[in-house]
Image (cartoon, coloured by chain):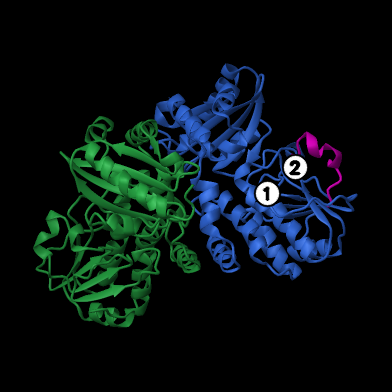
Chain colours: A green, B blue
Amino acid sequence: MDVTRQEAARLLLAAEDVLILCHRNPDGDTTGSAHALRLALRSLGKRARVQCSDPFPNRYSFLWQEVEAEDFEPKFIVSADIADEGLFGEGLAPWLGKVDLAIDHHVSHRPFAAHLLLEPDSASCCEVVCLLLREMGVDIDGKIALCLYTGMASDTGCFKFSNTTPRSHRLAADMMEAGAPCAEINKRVFETKSAGEFAAEREALNSMEIHFDGQAALIVLSAEMYERCGVTEADLGGIASLPARLEGVEVGVTIKERGPNSYKISMRSVKWVNVSDLCRQFGGGGHMFAAGCSLDGSLDEVKRTILSAVGAALARCPGSR
Amino acid sequence: MDVTRQEAARLLLAAEDVLILCHRNPDGDTTGSAHALRLALRSLGKRARVQCSDPFPNRYSFLWQEVEAEDFEPKFIVSADIADEGLFGEGLAPWLGKVDLAIDHHVSHRPFAAHLLLEPDSASCCEVVCLLLREMGVDIDGKIALCLYTGMASDTGCFKFSNTTPRSHRLAADMMEAGAPCAEINKRVFETKSAGEFAAEREALNSMEIHFDGQAALIVLSAEMYERCGVTEADLGGIASLPARLEGVEVGVTIKERGPNSYKISMRSVKWVNVSDLCRQFGGGGHMFAAGCSLDGSLDEVKRTILSAVGAALARCPGSR
């Protein structure tokens, strides 16, 4: 059942012993949303903890440094930034079908919770959470602002992507005034790379393939490369935007090896192609200009499947040569 | 003579036939400031044109597409974002000592104009110009907003750097509402690279040297490399932030070959080192975390000189290992 921000606020104010779920392969938005909610609920005297199938990337460690684990049997379950039950991952399997309130901003959201607060015009789930906390009367202090700013910045590529709205900027200004150390967060999230990440990026650059007369570019991140560079998939979160940066490219494809014959595909488009629609053909989804899906098969098969779909989408788009 | 925003507004409202100067090796801020001013003055029925020693980079071409050249003998000369007469370049030499009003935001500004509007707390010169245009009663339309947003975004690394303030975000929101196509600008300025730029970045990554126990990283961009990749120094504007991105690095140095035995050095620091002070030792300047200078000599001499100064600065800084 869809709920308004006011109704979601009432649900959370009435809740006790809250478990907050993040999507697998966590990014700054799911991490920031969940930790902001946790701090806010604690500030109201409630018990709350955050759970995720995968470990949180090291670059976001400042978000939960001061958090002690709270052990309790959850009475209310919230999901933050989870668009689909398929994104729960194995670690959250016990909670499938048990979510009381889903908070999300993905236009491709597939309802799975008893109550859904969905604001698809929001650039980030953290924007939704920020307005929800205000509705709840929570005092947004520096620590909460830090979490919220992290998600706002990371889901907009630091206010660079087309999902950024005037409200995104104004909420960021508010978070800054509430005490979020924005420059430090940005350095950590966007500007700092380990030697392994640098090495992986160099390899990705070297591996780039160009297709369809320069309209598509593709990179592959192999499990062997992760191993050799000492990085994880989550460490390379930003790398998916790399192929679409090449001048003239409309669709950028990043194929990440998840396991034997198992691949995660991230897509970015520049102007015309709706990659959310494109990824939905393969059971995935996301946003118009940034989406993803998973495919099984050999690397060659996966490449052929994806490139054929990309080629068809390019042929349909008005900017096609 | 220092002037207030109100006094600068009065000067510009009284001016006719205005020549607007940009600094050499133009970036988005000098380009955006100057073109915003030009459009604003034209909207007030005045003649105005923009001049720069170097060609404007192609990535900013959207700023002056609709501009016809206006030929006139200037009666009033304004400089936009020029911190020092040394940054005029040869093409602007006729105007040395003749600037009526300098508009700038560099803390290292060395006065050269009859009147100076200096706002060192501003993240970009475009923020100063935006508030100045409001003071002048100019209607900031979509085209002016496009110019102003370009400078605001490019000087803050798209609101990522420590110079970003809540005001920077709020002015960006205003520019967005005034009609600036922010996502397109950002794609052009931050997200699009030519094949040559990609190649140059790959070479830069491969050439990176690490010094002082990982606290400094250095890359060299040779004239031969510019030639081979088909790029100019201005095309690679953002590359100077690359070495400081490596985890653990405090000072990132980029050495760009300008000509035989002539080098431009760009420095970025992360937390402690004031690179503006550091570059001032060599006649340069800039901001605390981003500055530059020029040095003559062989590449080895220049490297030794710079690294020795960087080493001394690192030894003085509290975070030094």
Magenta span: B88-100
Numbered badge on residue A55: none
Determine the secondary structure under disc 1.
helix
Residue at 46% x, 63% y: name it: A172
Q: Which residue is mark 1?
A: B31
Position of residue A306 relative to residue A12, above or below, is: above
- Dot 1 or dot 2: first in sequence order is 1
The three-letter amino acid code for the residue at tag 2 is Cys
Q: Which residue is mark 2?
A: B52
Residue at 21% x, 49% y: name it: A55
Residue at 29% x, 53% y: name it: A292
Observer-nearest residue: A219 or B162? A219
| Mark 2 chain | B
Position of residue B129 relative to residue B206, above or below, is: below
Position of residue B212 relative to residue A297, above or below, is: above
Observer-nearest residue: B51 or B63? B63
Spatial CA distance of label 1 from label 2 is 9 Å
* Discs 1, 2 touching: Cβ within 8 Å: yes
Q: Residue A248 at x, y = what percent?
A: 49, 44
Q: Quadrant of the C terminus of chain B?
A: top left
Q: Does A197 lie within the magenta span?
A: no
